[in-house]
Amino acid sequence: MTDSLIFKVEGVAGKPGLKRDFTGAARIHVQVLDSVVDDEMAVSGTFTGTVDGVEARFTASTPVDLVCTRCLTEWTTVLETTADQHFSKIPDEDGYAIVDGTVDMAGPATDELVLAIPLAPVCKPDCKGLCPTCGTDLNTEPCDGHGDDSDSPFAPLKDLFDP
Ligand SMILES: [Zn+2]
Ligand SMILES: [Zn+2]
């Protein structure tokens, strides 16, 4: 494991079918809404030579701090994603290319990890969330409810109808 995501592809690039494994790591810092990634990303995979360059098949992973969109609980989990990135001497639409016989996997890995961040994280599938009236966390404490209409202007009427 090296502390970089820049890898030499000389000897594989332009040689269809030749393969070379790689593994590395680098700092990543991205934020999407309340989800924060500020850690090291680990990236490993295989370069396969193509006629004009290399195809990188890679797996990237990094810890992510999430906030439940229902109850605001914070927790940390691991994002992991697998993707392909093609490199040639001509930059692609994202600007990724073989430069001086090397490729930088940080950009493609970051792109894929950002896509793997959940847009509306929930701490558990059946999270009950917070009471919209008093803010009680309904997972830990039942809210007595605000539907009892003792404060309601109709309470006196209710007394009339309730025997
Ligand atoms: Zn929750
Ligand atoms: Zn409540």
Image (cartoon, helix red, strand yellow):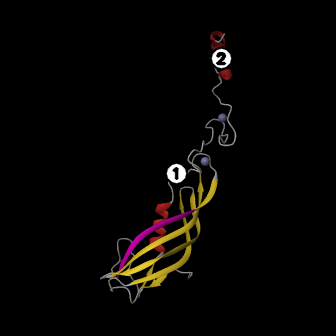
Q: Residues within 10 Å of mark 1 (few under 14, many from 20)?
A: few
Query: What residue span does the magenta drawing correspond to?
Result: 78-89
Question: Hey, what amino acid is under mark 1?
Answer: Ala
Q: Tell me if residue 151 comes above or below residue 82 in the rendering.
A: above
Q: Secondary structure at mark 2?
A: helix
Vertical arrangement, residue 90 with respect to residue 82, above or below: below
The residue lying at 64 percent from left, 51 percent from top is 73
Mark 2 Cβ and ligand 2 under 8 Å apart: no
Give the dominant element type of the magenta stretch: helix, strand or loop: strand
Reading the image, the residue beneath label 1 is 120
Q: Residue at x 58, y 45 (%)?
A: 70
For badge 2, the amino acid type reads Ala
| Label 1 element class | loop
- Give the image location of residue 93, x and y in percent: 35, 71
Say which quadrant the C terminus sits in. Answer: top right
Mark yes or no: residue 65 visible.
yes
